[in-house]
């Protein structure tokens, strides 16, 4: 029984970490007033790049490249949505399409071969055509990993530990420090923040880049830490689910932990039900669960009484300019 | 003298343009298209692929009659979905769910055919009208879900419409792997092929011509609705300002419901045009993202129904070119998707340049 709980819980953490990493950054972007709808595209690019660069240079380089690529991609969004004041929904969507198209293009067998040879000419022929990469190794924390049940929190790969540290740290910066206050004030009332001498554009640009970096990391984790087999569009809407999760967590990094594991749990239930061979329930119907859960979460949050208690960043989605 | 409206970023000055002509607007759009192809050329060159040859293949699509017909065929679902989006976007309803609504339209059309083939329901002459009716209703209903969530509970429509895309695609997967699988299909996840009476080939026996007629009729309907009818006017007012709409006595909630239903319905008919015009049966992944392409088309056409028809044919050509590129140059099919996204981004940047004047100031002599 304990073994069963441990395996389910362990898997829940593994899936949940994808959502957690992605939503942590997005919380910063949205708190500053920018909706980064490009999350999905950045994640899938992170996954594609971590695939290619793991084969060429190994895990560390792959993770770094994914994060950098995420930051650069979100910079496109920042320039277009913050400085050019273009519609954030449309711009973010364009970025997601770019990520999906470019990742499919770069990681396709033909193009990948060209890139891999350019990066590392000494790669053996056998590595040029494979569709998978070595998974990130699990690190067992001494003593802690031996505890029954809770131990599975400490038998994970390095990026899961990063998420354990990042979530409380991001919460602390956002709510207990001066830069965090500036960021929130920019999202609540940009005109007032501007009058206080805060550079609204720069704060929003930075916050968007943070969300891009975390989305790139989430993509790298999804591929290297969870399912290291490349297929086009392997994120399958996980970025959009993370966006719903940000709303469910009411833009709070600590609540995002709970929400991420909740959504991780929903996905694990789906895998388990398939394993138990519930023949009547098609796997395709079960696969709808996460998306339906995301809609349910959005509905739950927006019911009027709930909405009054929580703070939607007041200027979310509205470009700031000094003109009006 | 109008008040000076400008924002400065260091030495870059951004000023709002007070007004600009149509010619300027069109030339800016063309310029952004050219820029998009330049970016694509850079990507291709950096990977050692010949961009000139690639562009010859892409634009060659529009000169060869057979490929042009294929492009028109591919443009039908894009056009119909984009026409629906033009209604939704005019209402400020960010429907990103055209893809899912297209899939629901495919389900409805296929369902009618199967009801006739398996159970003998309906007469043969009723099939086509029923397919149109049900795909419109089911596509509309699929968009009505986020519409109702917005109208009733104030849930923002962006994420629900997105989520429902994945759900609709999974329903199709479920159907063709399960109850709707062709018993003579050797176990492949496909429905039975559509019989002749369920195919979209009334005009000249070709789905391309029939589809073009359908696109034009759709554009006329959308144009008429938005320009000459009361609901169309109300949709536009709600999009401009819900507060004004309420003040003017417009029932905002029912307008949102109607607008979202019509938008989804048109996308649903786009789904019909896929199963009954392009493929001739239902299969997984029957739409390679027509619903997302439709968003780009609607944006590029400035939500003008007539322009949407033309722009869809261009994008139908791009999708056709994707296949041609793979065959002739070994460039993966995802390239077509990438080109679309680059065009989308460049068009958006073009919008900015249309609306604002950007100048870089030189530091003046003698100034610190």
Image (tube, coloured by chain):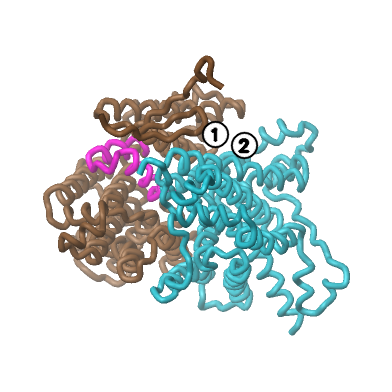
Chain colours: A cyan, B brown
Q: Residues within 10 Å of mark 1 (few under 14, many from 20)?
A: many
Report x, y in % for residue A251.
Answer: 54, 63
Closer to the camera in the image, A80 or A6: A80
Give the residue at x 31% y 71%: B152
Report x, y in % for residue A117.
Answer: 72, 33
Q: Give the SS element for disc 2.
A: helix
Q: Which residue is mark 2?
A: A110
Report x, y in % for residue B268.
Answer: 30, 57
Closer to the camera in the image, A168 or A119: A168
Q: Residue furthest bottom?
A: A1
**Is residue B92 in view?**
yes
Labelled pair 2, 1 in contact (Cβ < 8 Å):
yes
Q: Residues within 10 Å of mark 2 (few under 14, many from 20)?
A: some
Q: Which residue is mark 1?
A: B331
Span highlighted in magenta in the image: B289-315
Do discs 2 and 1 belong to a common subunit? no
Say whether residue B307 is magenta: yes
How far apart, in angstroms, are the residues tagged by discs 2 and 1? 7 Å
Q: Residue furthest right?
A: A142
Q: Give the SS element for disc 1.
A: loop
Which quadrant: the N terminus of chain A? Answer: bottom right
**Is residue A47 in view?**
no
Give the residue at x 54% y 34%: B331
Image-quadrant location for residue B148: bottom left
Q: Is residue A206 above or below residue A306?
A: above
């Amino acid at each position: 029984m304990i073994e069963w709980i441990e395996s389910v819980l362990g898997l829940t953490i593994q899936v949940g970490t994808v959502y957690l990493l992605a939503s942590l950054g997005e919380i910063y972007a949205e708190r500053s007033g920018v909706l980064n709808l490009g999350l999905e595209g950045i994640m899938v690019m992170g996954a594609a790049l971590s695939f290619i660069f793991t084969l060429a240079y190994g895990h560390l380089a792959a993770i770094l490249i994914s994060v950098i690529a995420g930051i650069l991609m979100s910079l496109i969004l920042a320039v277009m949505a913050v400085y050019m004041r273009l519609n954030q929904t449309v711009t973010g969507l364009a970025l997601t399409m770019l990520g999906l198209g470019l990742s499919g293009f770069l990681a396709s067998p033909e193009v990948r071969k060209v890139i891999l040879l350019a990066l590392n000419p000494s790669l053996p022929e056998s590595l040029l055509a494979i569709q998978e990469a070595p998974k990130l190794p699990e690190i067992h924390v001494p003593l802690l990993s031996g505890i029954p049940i809770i131990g599975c929190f400490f038998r994970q790969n390095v990026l899961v530990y990063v998420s354990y540290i990042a979530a409380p740290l991001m919460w602390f910066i956002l709510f207990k420090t001066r830069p965090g206050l500036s960021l929130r004030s920019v999202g609540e009332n940009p005109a007032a923040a501007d009058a206080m001498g805060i550079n609204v554009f720069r704060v929003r640009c930075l916050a968007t880049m943070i969300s891009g970096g975390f989305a790139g990391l989430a993509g790298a984790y999804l591929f290297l830490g969870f399912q290291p087999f490349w297929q086009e569009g392997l994120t399958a809407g996980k970025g959009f689910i993370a966006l719903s999760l940000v709303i469910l967590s009411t833009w709070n990094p600590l609540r995002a932990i709970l929400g991420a594991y909740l959504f991780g749990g929903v996905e694990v239930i789906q895998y388990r039900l398939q394993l138990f061979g519930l023949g009547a329930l098609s796997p395709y119907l079960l696969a709808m669960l996460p998306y339906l859960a995301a809609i349910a979460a959005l509905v739950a949050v927006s019911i009027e009484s709930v909405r009054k208690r929580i703070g939607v960043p007041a200027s979310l989605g509205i470009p700031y300019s000094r003109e009006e | 003298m109008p008040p000076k409206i400008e924002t400065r970023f260091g030495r870059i000055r951004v000023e709002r343009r007070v007004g600009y002509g149509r010619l300027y607007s069109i030339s800016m759009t063309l310029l952004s298209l050219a820029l998009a192809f330049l970016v694509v050329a850079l990507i291709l060159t950096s990977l050692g692929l010949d961009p000139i040859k690639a562009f010859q293949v892409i634009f060659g699509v529009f000169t060869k009659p057979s490929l042009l017909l294929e492009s028109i065929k591919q443009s039908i679902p894009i056009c119909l979905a984009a026409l629906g989006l033009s209604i939704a976007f005019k209402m400020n309803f960010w429907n990103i769910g055209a893809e899912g609504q297209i899939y629901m339209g495919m389900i409805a059309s296929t369902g009618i055919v199967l009801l006739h083939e398996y159970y003998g329901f309906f007469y043969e002459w009723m099939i086509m009208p029923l397919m149109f009716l049900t795909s419109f209703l089911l596509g509309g209903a699929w968009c009505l879900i986020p519409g109702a969530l917005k109208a009733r509970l104030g849930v923002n429509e962006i994420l629900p419409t997105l989520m429902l895309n994945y759900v609709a695609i999974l329903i199709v997967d479920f159907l063709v792997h399960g109850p709707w699988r062709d018993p003579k299909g050797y176990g492949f996840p496909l429905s039975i092929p559509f019989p002749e009476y369920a195919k979209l080939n009334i005009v000249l026996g070709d789905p391309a011509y029939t589809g073009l007629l359908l696109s034009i009729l759709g554009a006329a309907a959308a144009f008429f609705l938005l320009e000459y009818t009361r609901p169309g006017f109300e949709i536009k007012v709600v999009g401009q300002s819900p507060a004004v709409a309420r003040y003017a006595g417009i029932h905002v909630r029912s307008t949102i419901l109607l607008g979202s239903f019509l938008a989804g319905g048109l996308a649903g008919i786009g789904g019909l045009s896929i199963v009954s015009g392009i493929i001739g049966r239902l299969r997984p992944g029957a739409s390679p993202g027509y619903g997302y392409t439709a968003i780009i088309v609607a944006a590029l056409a400035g939500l003008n129904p007539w322009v949407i028809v033309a722009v869809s044919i261009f994008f139908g050509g791009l999708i056709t070119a994707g296949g041609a590129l793979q065959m002739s140059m070994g460039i993966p099919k995802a390239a077509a998707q990438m080109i679309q996204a680059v065009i989308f981004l460049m068009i958006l940047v073009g919008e900015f340049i249309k609306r604002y004047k950007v100048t870089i100031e030189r530091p003046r002599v003698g100034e610190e």
